[in-house]
């Protein structure tokens, strides 16, 4: 959890063996990228522009399919890519694409970004403060474009995944909050859902998760972190 100068609070999931880099802008918005240790600070930043085009309705369905296929290649180096690609697939209601992404995270022994599960990638469970997911298998299908044809991972079959760790208790990106109410949650995760919905009205601006000042306590409760309103003033860090 990061306190920003304007009083809002940004969320950044910390993942072992990855740098969690947060970039703050004058508008008050933040970008958060998870990249490998010792990688250049610029790695992964260009994907934000592509996401903006998709959200603005400037991409055709074929362009969304091709962009998702290309971006998926980097999701195991920059974990945030999976959360971003999940938005591309969700925009065209491609549930199998979401499940495929989740299965490959499991294959690489990496946690599944929460957003992938919320958009329809699987069923969410809670064990204590940690979240886990069951992911249904997918069947092989014909590639939808030449770009997919060159990337077998976009259309090959993927196996069932059971009780795989989920990265974070807070959606990585703003768009995924809209999927919380309808997400497939086991009864064990209903307390998590209630906490998430209580923070939802306080969402701030920008593509990544942050809440306004008045949502601080709700976000900390969701993260299972104790909030102290008397913490020292926020520090500025340069990447």
Image (cartoon, helix red, strand yellow):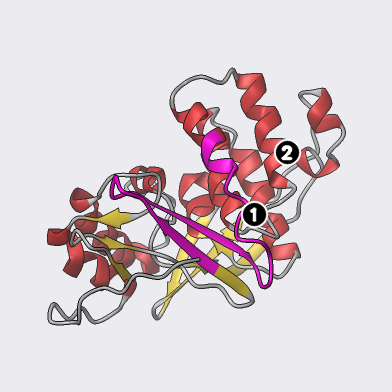
Q: Is residue 123 visible?
A: yes
Residue at screen point 36% across, 54% down: 209
Q: Residues within 10 Å of mark 1 (few under 14, many from 20)?
A: some
Q: Note whether 132 is above or below 30 in the view shown.
A: below
Residue at screen point 19% across, 52% down: 202
Q: Pick whichever of labels 2 and 1 is earlier in the sequence.
A: 1
Residue picked out by circle 1: 43
Give the image location of residue 237, x and y in percent.
Answer: 40, 70
Count of numbered marks: 2
Quadrant of residue 93 in the image? top right
Q: Is residue 160 visible?
A: no
Badge nearest the viewer, 2 or 1? 1
Front residue of 72/189: it is 72
User: For residue 29: magenta?
Assistant: yes
Front residue of 116/1: it is 1
In the image, which residues are magenta? 20-49
Left or right: residue 93 versus residue 151 is left
Q: Note whether 92 is above or below 24 in the view shown.
A: above
Residue picked out by circle 2: 70
Q: Circle 2 — which element?
A: helix
Front residue of 111/135: it is 111
- Locate the N terminus and report the quarter of the image it occupies: bottom left
Give the image location of residue 76, x and y in percent.
Answer: 70, 59
Give the image location of residue 56, x and y in percent.
Answer: 43, 24
User: For residue 47: magenta?
Assistant: yes
């Amino acid at each position: 959890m990061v306190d920003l100068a304007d009083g809002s609070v940004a969320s950044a999931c910390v993942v072992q063996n990855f740098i969690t880099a947060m970039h703050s802008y004058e508008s008050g918005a933040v970008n958060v990228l998870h990249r490998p240790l010792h990688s250049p600070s610029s790695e992964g930043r260009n994907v934000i522009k592509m996401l903006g085009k998709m959200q603005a309705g400037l991409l055709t369905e074929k362009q969304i399919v091709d962009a998702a296929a290309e971006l998926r290649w980097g999701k195991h180096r920059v974990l945030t890519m999976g959360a971003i690609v999940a938005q591309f697939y969700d925009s065209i209601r491609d549930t199998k694409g979401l499940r495929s992404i989740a299965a490959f995270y499991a294959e690489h022994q990496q946690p599944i970004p929460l957003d992938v599960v919320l958009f329809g990638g699987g069923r969410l469970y809670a064990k204590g403060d940690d979240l886990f997911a069951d992911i249904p298998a997918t069947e092989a299908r014909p590639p939808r474009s030449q770009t997919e044809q060159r990337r077998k991972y976009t259309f090959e079959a993927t196996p069932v995944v059971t009780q795989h760790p989920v990265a974070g208790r807070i959606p990585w990106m703003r768009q995924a909050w809209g999927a919380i109410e309808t997400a497939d949650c086991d009864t064990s995760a209903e307390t998590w859902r209630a906490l998430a919905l209580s923070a939802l009205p306080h969402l701030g601006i920008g593509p990544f998760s942050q809440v306004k000042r008045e949502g601080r306590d709700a976000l900390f409760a969701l993260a299972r972190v104790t909030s102290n309103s008397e913490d020292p003033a926020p520090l500025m860090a340069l990447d």
